[in-house]
Amino acid sequence: MSFLHTELRAPQARRVTATETTLTVDLVDGRTIAVPVAWYPRLLHATPRERSRTKLIGDGAGIRWPDLDEDVSVASLLSGRPSQESESSLQRWLETRHRAP
């Protein structure tokens, strides 16, 4: 009996696009994930320029928005997990944005 050995690899992002309504991530393996931006309140409150400034981290295992101090893992997108940020943390962040020049 023979077995097909396949190596499981962590999903990796290749390209990220975030609009006012949708976060879309193209994966290295050809899949595309699209979720509501509302799942990530910092992205929801961001300017188009802030949403467009992304950095792939962990060899594509995650996405970072440096201007927003927001990180999202590809695994959480695939599992359908929205942001776990608390309301109080979000409110503190929003207050700092209003104070910034």
Image (cartoon, rainbow, N blue to C red):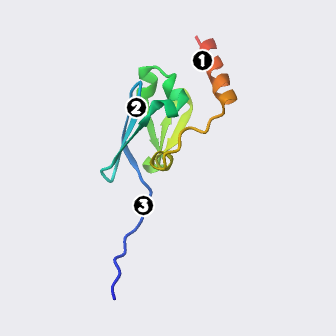
Q: Residue at x 63, y 27 (%)?
A: 90
- Image mark for residue 9: 3
SS at mark 1 in the image: helix
The residue lying toward the viewer, choosing from 59 and 48, is: 48
In the rendered structure, which amino acid carries the disc numbered 3?
Arg
The residue under the point 54% across, 27% down is: 42
User: x, y (%) of residue 95?
Assistant: 65, 18
> Residue 22: which disc?
2
| In the image: residue 49, left or right of residue 84 | left
| Callout 2 touching callout 3 (CB < 8 Å) | no
**In this rendering, would 30 be left or right of 83?**
left
Q: Position of residue 65 (x, y in %)?
A: 49, 32
* Residue at the image point whose x is 37% and y is 70% from the top: 6
Q: Quadrant of residue 5?
A: bottom left
- On screen, residue 55 above or below 7: above
Q: Nearer the viewer, residue 71 or 83?
A: 83
> What secondary structure is found at the residue carrying circle 2?
strand
Q: Label 1: which residue?
A: 97
Amino acid at pointer 1: Arg
Q: Amino acid at mark 2?
A: Thr
Tell me which corner region of the image, top left, top right, bottom left or bottom right, holds residue 101: top right
* Residue mark closest to the camera, 2 vs 3: 2
Quadrant into which the N terminus falls: bottom left
